[in-house]
Image: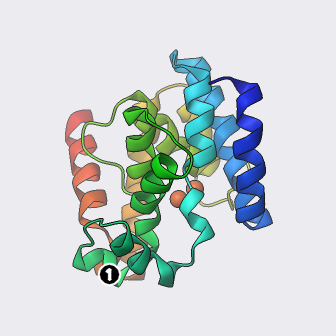
Amino acid sequence: MDFSEFSAIEDKLKKELDTARYRHTLGVAHTAVCLAMKYGYDINKAYLTGLLHDCAKAYKSKEQVSLAEKFGLEVSEAEKAHPQILHAKTGAYIAKNTYGIKDEDVLNAIRYHTTGKPGMNLLEKIIYVADYIEPNRTVMSRLDVIRKTAFEDLDAALLMILEDTVSYLNTKSPDNVDEMTEKTYEYYLKERT
Ligand code: FE
Ligand code: FE
């Protein structure tokens, strides 16, 4: 797949997503390409994954559980309580079945883009980080530092994002932290120290 073939996907996403989400989608795709250039990854695959990472966001939070059940995907209690995290799982399904993506790396990077997972591969890291630092993101504390770090030391940026995500979710309510996010944070914290 090359850039000319992405037009059809872009057109479809533009129709399905709201303006802000579509802008974010392009932001992630372009940022993922930049990170792929820096760290030596296939730029077309990075762009494609960035484009599709939020494809299930066309469905509202409330619809995510029934959508997942319809697709025959397992839904945990935590996911039932916080259905917004399900869009990663339903997104991987839609990418495969609606957009015809067969590449497991692409599908996994979509699948884990909200929670991360221990032992992420390069594409998974690129998408996870790009999702957080893309230009349309509302500026949070030290986002400028994280953006700079992402192009110097990807794992360091990854850990900073996990740290900020866990502490942000904790301030809202401790049970807001998904188990997988927690596991990912602990994994990367241990790896760095
Ligand atoms: Fe997302
Ligand atoms: Fe996103």
Give residue 179's position: percent from left, percent from top: 23, 65
Residue 15, image quadrant? bottom right
The residue nearer to you, when weighing 145 against 150, is 150
Q: Say which residue appears at 44% left-offset and 52% top-offset.
A: 92
Relative height, residue 40 to residue 170 (above, below):
above
Q: Say which residue appears at 33% left-offset and 74% top-offset.
A: 69
Amino acid on which disc 1 is placed: Lys
The residue nearer to you, when weighing 81 against 5, is 5
Image side of residue 113 versus residue 185, left or right: right
Q: Residues within 10 Å of mark 1 (few under 14, many from 20)?
A: some
Q: Which residue is tagged 1?
A: 80
Q: Quadrant of the N terminus?
A: top right
SS at badge 1: helix
Residue 32, image quadrant? top right
Residue 165 is at least partly visible in this image: yes
Image side of residue 1 versus residue 111, left or right: right
Image side of residue 145 versus residue 190, left or right: right
Give residue 86's position: percent from left, percent from top: 40, 68
Residue extending farthest to the top is 40
Residue 136 is at least partly visible in this image: no
